[in-house]
Amino acid sequence: MTTKPRVRVKAATAPVTLPSAVRDPSRTGSKFLRDGRSAVFDLRPAALRDSREEIRVAWKRAAGLALDLIQNSGQLRGAADQVIADTVGSELVLNPQPDLSGLGYSDDEKAEFVATIKRRWKRYAWNPRECDQRGKFTLPQMIDIALRWDMAYGEAVGVMSYMTRAQRRQYGITAGTKVCMMPPPMLVQDTSEMEGIYQGVIHDPNGRPVAYRFREKETGLYVKRDYRAYDGNGRQVVMHVFDPMDATDVRGISRIAPAFRQYIQREILVDTTIQTAILQTVFAATLTSPTPSKDAFEAIETLDDDLGSDFKDYFQSALDRAAESEIRISGDPRVSHLAPGEDLKILSTGTPGPQFVPVSAELSRDMARAIGITYGGMTMNHTGATYSSVRMENSSVWPVVVRRRERIAAPPNQAVYENWLDEEIGEGRIPFKGGYAAFAANRDRVTWALWQGPAKPSADDLKSGKASTERLLNGTSDLDIECAELGVDADEVFERRLRWHRRYVAAGMPSPFVPRNNGKSDLAETEEPPAKREDA
């Protein structure tokens, strides 16, 4: 039998002190949100919740605050107008892009089809009686409303409807396709997982919207009514556009919600600064006088009668002279002779201090960034701006403007255009090869269109023009791209240039559309050059 050797362990004579990082494993290593000695992360608690649930909880509060700020702030109202001007200008110009391949259209027939659509669309979109269910607003005005709603509510909602022939005869109008813009608060906040409804939007099992529930006023009472998202033929009925934060979002939230705190802080800063400046202005004049106080007079009375009497007579004469003078600081300021020994000082106000401008500017930049406009467009303050800074500012915000145009402004236009063109072809006002059946079978291909907004802002038109010419000459661009940068339709530009060129030629005048440096005559080739006529 073998025995294991014994191991004798000697006890430590002194405790071993480990580093603090070893004693506290939670403070070791490299990881996200590792706090420091200041414990800044502990001062800002945060909870993780579903995005659409966050929006549902905060929607009414955010909408109320946004409306209050916009309605009581000239700066925010101006910012909303700036958003509209940057995004759509006077209107979004329709540029139809129908795919007519395989439908028997030649290039000339396609061009004529597109030209007919443009002519009829202009007359429809700019006639309130034709496009608006209420008969009050043009389609560009309704898009303006949608952009303002996007800023205040974070979404825009509208309902498409159709007037019968009898109803149209009553109003003396042609088109039956109508748009009714619905304020987002009319879209209810009802939420029920059992019914598949979330914030007023009813979904199918696949999560697709099938209906919208609105709260409408009828004969003095509020009733809830459901509108289908699409009709039986696949035409869109409810227009609902918003900028989602998460894939599960159902509704939008005010675009300026992330900047509420900064704007209110700036409002408090400005109000406090103004009030302080007013108080300092009122009390900026000080009068220094050697005239003794009540305690001094009581001390004089304790002196000998003769000495006290002399002091009293002296001060009495000084007060009499002071009574004859006058100091008035008001709307009618007046300063007369002062009493002996008195000194009037006018002090300067110390408000606003040197820190006011940078703090106010930083808060305004935060708000401008949330809205999606430039700091100069938000505040109309261009102090210290240079060509390079303005160019960089415009270049950074322009993709935001284009994105807002494509995400918020263009979808309502496209929805109205698709339903309108469906009606125009269905009722024979715009001819289509194969009739309405051929169009219905290819509706998505035929109704495809682009929407062009205003030109990209430029700090120097001459430099921008030279850059555009260089891109065309080196082959990195084309007329469609360059005309889109200017906010115009390339096809319309060509037609106008051709019409005016022919008119100049017919009048025997040099055409401004013929290059002057190629040695050719500005007149038509069928005419004899001026040099030959002189030789003859």
Image (cartoon, rainbow, N blue to C red):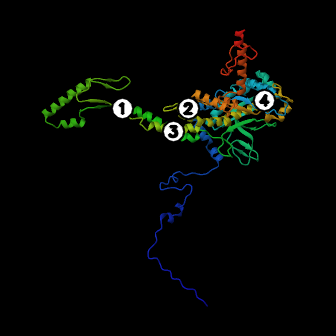
User: Compared to 491, does 208 lie above or below?
Assistant: below
Residues 225 and 201: in front is: 201
Q: Where is residue 319 in the image (x, y as percent from the top left)?
A: 23, 28
Q: Which residue lies most toward the bottom here?
A: 1
Q: Which residue is denoted by mark 4 in the rendering?
A: 421
Amino acid under label 3?
Answer: Leu
Q: Where is residue 464 in the image (x, y as percent from the top left)?
A: 60, 29
Q: Position of residue 123 (x, y in %)?
A: 73, 23
- The quarter of the picture where the C terminus appears is top right
* Cα–Cα gap, marks 2 and 1: 33 Å
Q: Which of marks 2 and 4 is nearer the N terminus?
A: 2
Amino acid under label 4?
Answer: Leu
* Res 242 visible: yes
User: Compared to 139, does 361 lie above or below?
Assistant: below
Mark drawn on residue 14 = none
Check disc 1: other Cα within 10 Å, few if <14, some if 14-19, many if 20+: few
Mark drawn on residue 363 = 3
Residues 423 and 400: in front is: 400
- Judged from the image, the secondary structure of the residue bearing numbered disc 2 is helix
User: Is label 3 in contact with label 1 (beta carbons under 8 Å)?
Assistant: no
Q: Which residue is denoted by mark 1 in the rendering?
A: 348
Check disc 2: other Cα within 10 Å, few if <14, some if 14-19, many if 20+: some
Q: Which of marks 2 and 4 is in front?
A: 2
Q: Is 180 left or right of 289, judged from the image as shown?
A: right
* Cα–Cα gap, marks 3 and 4: 47 Å
User: Is label 4 in contact with label 1 (beta carbons under 8 Å)?
Assistant: no
- Judged from the image, the secondary structure of the residue bearing numbered disc 1 is loop
Q: Which residue is denoted by mark 2 in the rendering?
A: 377
